[in-house]
Amino acid sequence: MVTVIPDVKVKVNEFIIQWLSQDKVFDQLSDDLSCILNGKVPDVVPTKLINNRSLSPPHHKHPASPRSSPRVPGSPNRGSAARTKSNRTPSPAHEIKKSSPSISNKLKRPQEIIPQFYFPMGKPSTPPQRVDDSRLSKIKDLFEECKDGLMAPRDFGSVTKAAELPLYWKCPLFEACSSSDTCSYQQFLQVYEYLESYCHDEASKFLRVLTKGTRSHIIWEDFNNLIQDVIDTHPGMSFLDDAPEFHARYIETVTGRIMYTVNRSWSSKITITELRESNFLKVLASLEDEPDINQVSDYFSYEHFYVIYCKFWEIDTDHDLIVSLDDVMRHADGTVNPRALERLFEGTVTYNKTETLTYFDFIRFLLAEEDKSHPTAIEYWFRIMDLDGDGFISLFELEYFYQAQLEKMRLLGVEECSVLDCICQALDLVRPKEETKITLTDIKKCKQPSLFFNIFLNIQKFLDHELKDPFSNKDGEVPLTDWEKFAAREYEDLIADEELNKQYEYEDDFEDEDEEIPMMGNVVAKSAVETYGK
């Protein structure tokens, strides 16, 4: 026999829903809320509910006991009434009213105002600072020195510095003020007053200037004119004046490095938060004080651009600025795991699935390949190794990539390491929270993410690490990133190759077909690069 046990909770919920569904209950609750907001104490037992007995759940009426005799109308039982009055317990409302003065005093206290803690355009200064009149007067004099009070873009650097902004903001600042070839003082003043009134930090001002106030984020095309201005006016880039066909490639390289480093959300849109958390504005400001562009290793170094450009040239045999899977497999003499390269073309780290990679895509690949400890590189290769996209790198996925590494070991004649030993070494290195799953957080907490990825993705780098002298780094030296070491090494090799080529004489017809890529005062002969200048 099955015993049915009533669910008390379900029944209580049913009564509560029935009670709340009545109109007068809703009205009373609204009145109580108004009382609380006005600092008053609502009645615990509302009058509306006392007078309306129908609001309470219906009770089953039991027949009168045979022992109790019906009362005769007009003859009240005074004793019973007295006993009822004396024995009655105080109502909850009566108890609450006794303590109502203290509750009322608490409610009448002024409400605490939570201060603003989110400032999307920067935290304003207290008290608010007005625009310096002497600064505006100086800027106005600069405009009056120009013909008809109209200033050209080439002269806007003086205005930018007078406004106490970084020098290389001058091009986007001019474009934000005027859409023509000249700018008046009133046009500048309108933009400048907005910056001083509503943009309270450097990042918000730069965003407003670069986007002309049309967007709340920066896209890669916004950097084009700014970088072109660096090419045209920075003293360290003067050697490139005679090679305008390479300006577009330098702009694309610098922009690719900016998006790779700053756009941590992988959205191709740089937000103001990402701008604040990056070092881009600091690096951009440093260009003014550094005449050697190569000393600015982040983003703008011409040597780094040259290395990236030549590495792409080596695999782009038809020079159409597009490389296929077969082309990429020739990179670094084929030491990169082919199974990882196949994942590049499946849309895991690009914005869409494609059969080819552009030069812009190759920039990200090369940066991630040569410095796997960079935060973006960690995310880059984690996406590559996470085959099913479940947010974990499983033991199966580790084995899948390591099988390709074993084949390369056999080709190189290197002593093989079993899959089990390799996976155990990787797990000991990362120490994941779950023994059979490696998360992105686990790798970011790892002290040697490059070693972990190279075990499964680049056998040559893994072997180089095993043979590396642990005491090779000298004390007192500024540590370089893996990318900086790679770029310096490759650039030296390119210079050595150029010096070697100078020892040979070229035939006239060979020289006519060559295009020269400027290399900081030197030139390197590269054939058929007309496409790159388009």
Image (cartoon, rainbow, N blue to C red):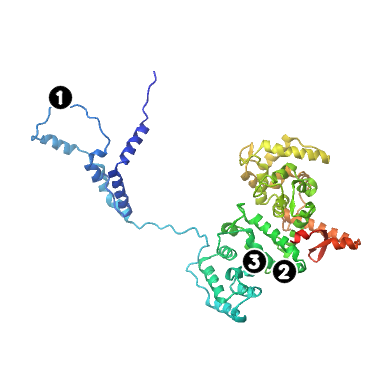
Q: Earlier in the sequence, mark 2 or mark 3?
A: 3
SS for dot 3: helix
Please determine whether, in this image, residue 320 is positioned above or below residue 92. Answer: below
Q: Position of residue 138 (x, y in %)?
A: 58, 79
Q: Report the quarter where the N terminus lies.
A: top left
| Residue at the (25%, 32%) spot, across then down | 59
Q: Which mark is residue 67?
A: 1
Q: Which mark is residue 285?
A: 3
Q: Which residue has dot 2 on it?
A: 291
| Residue at the (73%, 35%) spot, across then down | 419
Q: Nearer the viewer, residue 363 or 296?
A: 363
* Residues at circles 2 and 3 in contact by the CB criterion of under 8 Å: no
Amino acid bearing label 2: Pro
Please determine whether, in this image, residue 308 is positioned above or below residue 206. Answer: above
Q: Earlier in the sequence, mark 3 or mark 1?
A: 1
In the image, 318: left or right of 192? Answer: right
In the image, 203: left or right of 514? Answer: left
